[in-house]
Image (cartoon, helix red, strand yellow):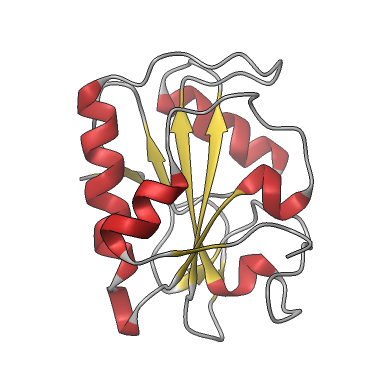
Amino acid sequence: MNVIRPYLDYVDRTVPARMVVIGAYQEIPPEVYVDHLRKAGESWHFLVPKRGEIVRCLPLTSTGFYCGRSDGPDGQHVNDYSFGVCVEGFDGDGAAHRMPLSQRQALYELISYLRYYDGGCPWIGMAWDVTRGMGPKSFPLNLTVLQRDLGYTIWRKGR
């Protein structure tokens, strides 16, 4: 795993993580995207670039800022109790690109690990579902497969 040092800005987590939130960013090198995140005041725990590596941007004991102040299943702010995973190769206009096998394998490896980290994260959701934001029209990751294979419960705003 590639670890960004120094980490992006964060605060220590006060509650255990119970959810994995997956987002997407445009097709640019992760080092460039990290600079953008620093300037924007945003932070994800992990980036998964197309080249198939896992880039950690925050300690697992921290709270990142990737879902604004969105409320999750129990009314708490999603950022407070989730891990943020951002996947390269999907731009803001809704265009989705094919996910290379190495990227898909890295993403599955990471979310498999997070599913059982520190007591377990039973929930998984897409950032645009959690925030009601505009996400890619199609994203090559089937949450139903993750539900079946890893035992996740899918979270969508308004359920």
The x and y percentages for residue 17 are: 47, 76
Q: On the image, which quarter does residue 140 sit in?
A: top left
Relative to residue 21, is residue 16 depicted above or below?
below
Count of picture labels: 0
Left or right? Give the position of 22 relative to 54: right
Q: Is residue 25 left or right of residue 57?
A: right
| 144 left or right of 72 in image | left
Q: Quadrant of residue 112?
A: bottom left
**As rendered, which of 158 and 96 lies closer to the eye?**
158
Q: Is residue 32 above or below residue 40?
A: above
Tell me, yes or no, if residue 147 can be seen here.
yes
Query: In the picture, which quadrant includes the N terminus?
Result: top left
Q: In this orientation, does residue 6 appear?
A: no
Q: Percent x, y for residue 11? A: 58, 71
Q: Quadrant of residue 104?
A: top left
Nearer to the camera, 59 or 39: 59
Check the image and report above or below for 21 versus 39: below
Taking the spot 41% from the left edge, 73% from the top edge, the residue there is 121
Quadrant location of the C terminus in the rendered image:
bottom right
Left or right, 37 with respect to 54, comes to right
Residue 26: horizontal and vertical position, in percent? 55, 20
> Residue 19 at x, y = what percent?
50, 68
- Residue at 29% x, 74% y is 117
Residue depicted at 24% across the width and 39% down the height: 106
Q: Nearer the viewer, residue 33 or 75?
A: 75
Rendered position, 137 above or below 109: above
